[in-house]
Amino acid sequence: MNNSITDVPGVLVGHATDLDALTGCTVVLVEGGAVAGVDQRGGAPGTRETDALHPMHLVDKAHAVLLAGGSAFGLDAAGGVMRFLENKGVGFDTGFGRVPIVPAAVLFDLGIGKANVRPNAEMGYQACKNASKLPAAEGNVGAGTGASVGKIFGMRQAMKSGVGTASIDLGGGLVIGAIIATNAFGDVIDPQTGKIIAGARTIDKSAQSPFLDTLETMKSLFGKTVLHFSSQHNTVIGVVATNAKLNKEEANKVAQMAHNGLARAIRPAHTMFDGDTLFALATGKKKADVNLIGAYAAECVAKAILRSVQLASPVAGLPAAKDD
């Protein structure tokens, strides 16, 4: 176990990163196909192929999931993932050709780096070429390259975040893992201590804490006033994966339960300023109770979110948790 989503058999991860433009994309590849589900909680999503993953729809397996920066422009990168898989003969068999099923979600990172450079099909293809079973790189890479958190007062008082991953051995060969790109409106909290790890920073040098505490600030008179003008440039996106045998309804339930981890580690979560979206992938090898998988999916998500800020590096004037 490497504390990475790639600990799940059949799951590969690849990043494509543009450190100049401060954007990128991350692909989770399951070339053999995985039963897939999705749960979208935030009020400002940017997604592709999510309807196909819901129950009562024909397709029940995905072959990859794309996470990207670039706001809605970044969805273009999914075309490169499809091309990569098509070249390998991977996809849903239509009788006339195989169509790769590649759900995708994007986050808003246009406010950092170069707004006119976004993940495209070439970057999506490159992320696939970089995919491997090695522990997934974390921090300022892939979809998390331009990610930030704590934006109630905009980028000036925000902090750098990135991509994080985690896995848990559930025994008997059963594994659950998650990879998250954290670009939240709120603060990232350590669920064990309640302490803010990264978030909106105070400019009051005499303050006891370097953090404003977004939740507390929101109920203040000033917070209520500024909230109407707060950053709408957020979204937490990610994937949980397991080698459990789940059907489509169960995979969607796991995606739903995984959001509990997001809510534990980010305060506040699922706001109208966020497009929080989590996918679930089940490679279908090990029998397991969906309640067990969903409960530990939430644990993995919370751990991955913490790592996404702990391993991020300062850039473009944004400090990072590792500075402390």
Image: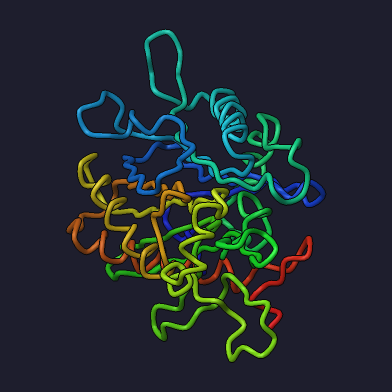
**For this rendering, which residue is in front, 298 or 90?**
298
- Quadrant in the rendering for residue 311: bottom right
Q: Residue at x 39, y 23 (%)?
A: 92
Relative to 252, say whether 242 is above or below.
below
Q: Position of residue 272 (x, y in %)?
A: 42, 49
Seen at 35% across and 62% down, the residue is: 175
Residue in view at x 20 percent, y 54 percent: 287
Relative horizontal placement of residue 166, taking residue 172 as reference (left or right): right
Quadrant of the drawing holding the C terminus: bottom right
Residue 71, picture quadrant:
top right
Between 73 and 217, the one lying in front of the other is 217
Give coordinates of residue 227: x percent, y percent.
50, 58
Residue 36 in which image quadrant: top left
| Residue 193 at least partly seen | yes
Q: Position of residue 284 (x, y in %)?
A: 29, 46
Q: Residue at x 33, y 28 (%)?
A: 52
